[in-house]
């Protein structure tokens, strides 16, 4: 995997993104620049750059003369994300199934026992992190298209936010995710791109339904 230096603004963005994903910063919450820079002990310039990164990830919105605020969660936003992102991810899965070479798939397959262990121990947070690590590695390794990789990477934080809502709404989502990941790896190893793509679409459709139910209940 390609290593990269992480700037201070990226570290700030990652920190705030994690808070937004876990609901520690609520939809619509304002992010006052001066107060937040003081709290994090960073310059306002670094914080502003972090805000721009978070805006690109669709986690916050920057409003002229009103500052930054956490994006709301609506039914249309959920549908739009899952429709578009899982179209990209199904393409990625198909490419992995068609093109993987020895040495490219073994570490991903080795994650399955870790998924199972998280499930058996009820470690929802660990399973959530592991799933996104899986996608990160697969994107870096199999996207083979800079635009496909960039779009998936930019949308991952928003998917993390919505999938965390799904895991909180229904713990059975964890079980479904595990079973689909198992089947996905089987179909990738069997070099069946159509079934691998279908697995990813099924995963997205199932999770989207759960998030929409949560949005309807909680009225974010």
Image (cartoon, grey):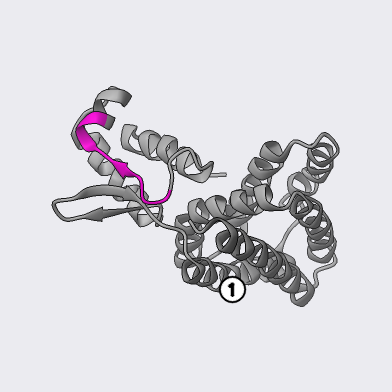
Q: Quickly name the residue at label 1.
A: 87
Whole-percent x, y for residue 52 in the image: 28, 49
Residue drawn 57% across the image and 68% down it: 82
**Where is 136 relative to 190, above or below?**
above
In the rendered image, residue 181 lying in the magenta stretch gets the answer no
Residue 138 or residue 63, whichever sits in front: 63
Whole-percent x, y for residue 182 in the image: 83, 56
**Where is 45 relative to 176, above or below?**
above
Residue drawn 83% across the image and 57% down it: 179
Q: Secondary structure at mark 1?
A: helix
Residue drawn 83% across the image and 37% down it: 117
**Where is 82 relative to 20, above or below?**
below
Q: Is residue 3 left or right of residue 9?
A: right
Whole-percent x, y for residue 89 in the image: 61, 66
Q: Is residue 38 left or right of residue 216?
A: left
| Residue 182 visible in image | yes
Quadrant position of the N terminus in the picture: top right
Residue furthest to the bottom:
194
Residue furthest to the left:
65
Q: Is residue 23 left or right of residue 195?
A: left
Whole-percent x, y for residue 215 in the image: 56, 61
Residue 96 or residue 65, whichever sits in front: 65
Please state the extent of the stretch shown in magenta in the rendering: 27-35
In the rendered image, residue 28 lying in the magenta stretch gets the answer yes
- Circle count: 1
Residue 158 or residue 188, whichever sits in front: 158
What is the quadrant of residue 10 in the picture?
top left
Q: Is residue 64 left or right of residue 68?
A: left
| Residue 5 visible in image | no
What is the quadrant of residue 12 in the picture?
top left
């Amino acid at each position: 995997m390609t290593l990269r230096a992480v700037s201070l603004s990226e570290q700030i963005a990652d920190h705030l993104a994690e808070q937004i994903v876990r609901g520690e910063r609520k939809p619509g919450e304002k992010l006052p620049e001066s107060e937040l820079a003081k709290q994090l002990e960073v310059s306002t310039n670094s914080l502003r750059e972090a805000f721009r990164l978070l805006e690109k990830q669709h986690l916050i919105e920057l409003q002229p003369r009103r500052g930054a605020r956490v994006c709301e969660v609506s039914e249309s936003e959920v549908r739009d994300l899952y429709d578009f992102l899982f179209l990209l991810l199904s393409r990625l899965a198909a490419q992995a199934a068609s093109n993987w070479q020895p040495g490219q798939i073994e570490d991903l397959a080795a994650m399955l026992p870790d998924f199972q262990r998280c499930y058996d121990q009820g470690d929802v947070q660990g399973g959530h992190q592991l799933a996104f690590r899986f996608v990160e590695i697969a994107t870096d390794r199999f996207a083979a298209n800079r635009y496909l990789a960039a779009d998936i990477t930019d949308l991952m934080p928003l998917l993390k936010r919505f999938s965390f809502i799904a895991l909180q709404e229904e713990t059975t989502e964890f079980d479904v995710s595990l079973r689909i990941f198992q089947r996905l790896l089987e179909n990738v190893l069997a070099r069946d791109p159509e079934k691998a793509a279908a697995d990813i679409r099924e995963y997205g459709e199932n999770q989207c339904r759960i998030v929409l139910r949560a949005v309807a209940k909680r009225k974010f």
